[in-house]
Amino acid sequence: MATTEHRPNIGATPRRKEDPELITGEARYTEDLTPPRTAHVVMVRSPFAHANIRGIDTAAAKAHPGVSDVLTAADLEGAFAAPLVCAWPIVDDIKIPPVYPVEGTRARYAGQIVAVVVADSRAAAQDAAELVEVDYDPLPAVIDPEEAMADGAPQLFDDVPNNVTYHWRSKEHSPVPSAGDPDPIMASAPVVVKERFRLERLVPNAMEPRSILVEPNASQGEYVMTSATQIPHIVRTVLTLITGVPEAKLRVIAPAVGGGFGSKLQVYAEDAICLALARRLGRPVKWTADRTEEFVSVHHGRDQWQEIELAADADGKLRAVRVRIVAGMGAHHLLLTPGIPMLGAWLYGGCYTADAYSVEIIGVFTNNTPTDAYRGAGRPEATYAIERAMDALARKVGKDPAELRRMNMIPTDAFPNYTIMSGLSVDSGDYTGSLDKLLATLDYQGLRREQAARRASGAARQLGIGLSTWIEMCGLAPSRVAGALKLVCGLWEACTVKVMPTGTIQVMIGVTAHGQGHETTFSQMLADQLGVDYDDVQIIAGDTLTVPFGMDTYGSRSLAVGGIAMHNAGEKVIAKARGIAAHTLECAEEDLEFANGSFTVKGTDRSFGIKEAAFAAWTAHNLPDGMEPGLEATYVYDPPNFSWPGGAHACVTEVDTHTGAVKILRYVSVDDCGVIINPQIVEGQVHGGVAQGIAEALFEGAQYDEAGNLVTGTMTTYLVPSAAEMPSFEVLNNPNAPSPTNPLGVKGIGEAGTIASPPAVINSVVDALSHLGVTNVERPATPERVWRAIQEAGQ
Amino acid sequence: MIPAEFDYRVAGSVEEAIGLLSGNEDAKLIAGGHSLIPLMKTRLARPSMLIDVARVPGLTGVARDGGTLRIGAMTRWHDLERDPVLREHCPIVAEAAGQVGDPQVRHAGTIGGSVAHCDPASDIPAVLLALDAVIVAQGPGGTRRIAASECFEGFFQSALAHDEVLTAVEVPVLDGAGCAYVKFNQRAIDWAIVAVAAVVRHSGGTISEARIALTNMGTTPVRARAAEAAMAGASGDAIAAAAALADQGTDPPEDTFAGAEYRRNLARVLTLRAVERAMGA
């Protein structure tokens, strides 16, 4: 009698476990916590992008009622054992000038911390911060990374000539061989297109700003830090390096965290300052960023000048890809700053085949906020360049952009394990399948006919159809690869599954959610695996004391790495329970089959449930000889490969040629994110990701004045769009290419929308206007920029 | 994002508010607060006292008196947007009110607060200018009536004295005239990059009179006089030609949203669209 396995949860959309406390306001964010005797911290920040600090007078601020101390870099000498940490020195000769949490001699960006005010209330600290008198000697500032590397540009550091911190070349620095050398092909190919794009800086705007509370137990030298962070484990390790507080005496808790998008994948000056102050003062210390402050102090994203060249045959068959990136680092390196552009260096060939490939990246210091990971981190940049360039190639050879893409795609039968032109092995994909589904859903030919009719009539509002057929590497990452790329950590993940005596299950996992819905997704998976109820599973994360040492949440890794750690821990639990069941049922383990939470002796109705095994393991009255009591297991999973989602997106726009306004009529996505655990959560990630990509394409961009001040530093001037500006998304998936790399076939979806959508949007705008001679609109494609592109093309 | 210290008083009457203002040069009236509070949080404004007039009785609602509609100064955008009298007799006010900010703003912000704040990017001043509206203010010496054309003196500078309280706005009943408010922005919640208010009398496709006022084309809302003059008697293509004069005499700002040249283009394009809509196109 074979038992049919019942998996009611995977692929379903149960009620999300996260939502009740968020909806009712019971969720506790860091800012909600104010223990007795809390000292409130306000940072004094440089208003100048570049200035020598001649002196700081803190007397008036110290005299303000309620102020307990005002500290400068000089006062905090000795508080820090090391400068801020950069964990990704991507080449041996990279220049990483030491920068400490509080700057004492030279401010290098507007927003850099130059003094710290501590008071009994936030208001008193804020008032006193205005009384700190800093004597600045302003210096010339440089914001644009290309200008910064030119001779004669203002120099940020004396020992970093031309502000160039590194020069990474795939030919020299890639640990895997790329396809051939593009240089000779570029010189001889029948068709070459060369495109140049500016990717403006983006400011991450998580709904919850950063917030930190440090509670000391001074006599024991112990500290509990509660922080709005994506990475409690990494924060702990790095803060130990910076402050010297022993790692074993530091506990970091990420409570409810309201979004991150990479901005909370960081160990900031403020983290180190709060810990140092708690040690110095022996009382709880709290700092919460206000929104204006967050605009200049949270790390930024993107900031690149891109040059991409494609060589092709006359019919558009791609032969070679050559890329040169000048990447703005901001004023100094933070945790992963140098590596972010390089994380994209593997994807400038997209989902296409070619004979030759090279990428070089020049990292440049500039007088503004440091850059680092922002949703997609390197991969949206790469996807933007190749997908925009493919449209340029299509125009050049006179082919439809969909057709040009199809003829150059990696064929589905090339999988599994196809080596792409950058040298990495992609485990699975079905790019033509996604494109076909997209075009059919769009009625692509019908749209092209409507476009032709509008062009013929000379209508004010023209139609554009933009495509983006994308690929990404996520599920970060195989630790050996991380090492080969010079990242100073592994990227494995850890999970403990503990079956309690009464049968409910605690899962302690190293990845921590800040909006992703881990509790729901992981509960669904484990419930099906162990054959228990969804509500029997409790997910615990975000506390270095209670969960196994993990590597936290970013890079679409929670499911494809953390989820597999949990799955494998679950398999160990089942294996142990099987031993107990066999012992109890007096049969061989091989005679048992496990389904729906129960071990059954094959061909009989004798069975023993996993919950019974948990109780037996707890009493330990009758366990097999030598077996440890208790039913729990830990697995530390190091993925053998990245996961490789891909897909095809289309954006249909209507462009008002009189005003330059862009209206998105339709946005259709077909994504392959592997096996889907929870369709609603996947759909939500696509909605949010695409919205963020549309924001990047049409709305958001950090603008600076000549002096280096951020002039789009508020929610009024930095245009984060809302639902009112979004179309209704048509979200489809391609289920034909589950990952063969992990036992669940999952890939990841957290960053896909942000990676895929910006080129789809801009390609659509350019497509709407190409008959007028427009070939490029810089992003964000504001109405004025679109209007100017039309005017310039008409001249 | 914490304001500097201030006192807070709730005025029970216009007279009480005037008294408090008279005694304190740094005091500010607060209505909906959606312009003032952000300025205070960033400490660009530091009033020593806020006098809350939002709850003063008798300052809300729309009432018809012959050919005039009297709008209480503390009437909120949301209520203006839905007011049946306004929608029937002066729909451009309701139309503009419905485009201010987002629902949260429209449930707090008031017409009087916006007029007194005098932001050149705000919607209602240009509408009042196109309507030849009257602003009613009460001060220690009594009540005075200010023509809209005299009210918006400069950048965030109204004709109201420090100790005057704006109590009402009077707009005409639009018998037979068409009207439209066309606003251009990137996000629904934003201030206008440029907007155009048009009140047009027309018959059989020919315009007899057009009153056109522009939002955010200078330090105050401005009438598009050259376009208005060319519109009189115009029909067909002549209307488009007249609209192309809309930016004449303006001095549009350059900011992070747009440059002056682009704003001039918008003024021309949106004027034509507003006039066409006012004429029922």
Image (cartoon, coloured by chain):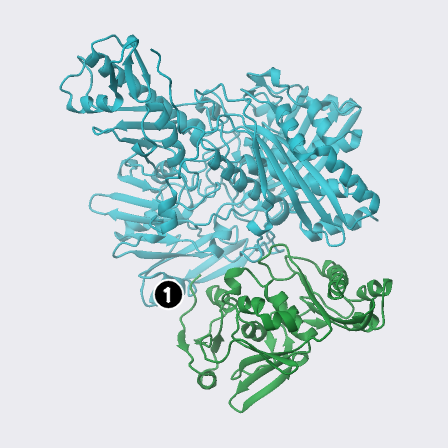
Chain colours: A cyan, B green
Residue at the image position 31 percent from the left and 65 percent from the top: A66
Give whichever of A14, A726 is nearer the camera: A14
Left or right: residue A553 versus residue A181 is: left
Give whichever of A321, B179 is nearer the camera: B179
Q: Chain of mark 1?
A: A
SS for callout 1: helix
Residue at the image position 25 percent from the left and 7 percent from the top: A588
Q: Is residue A694 visible?
A: yes
The answer to whether residue A69 is above or below residue A175 is: below
Return the x and y of residue A649 as percentages of the image width and height.
Answer: 62, 34
The answer to whether residue B5 is above or below residue B168 is: above
Q: Amino acid at mark 1?
A: Ala
Q: Is residue A337 visible?
A: no
**Which residue is tagged 1?**
A59
Q: How many marks?
A: 1
Return the x and y of residue A187 as percentages of the image width and height.
Answer: 77, 24
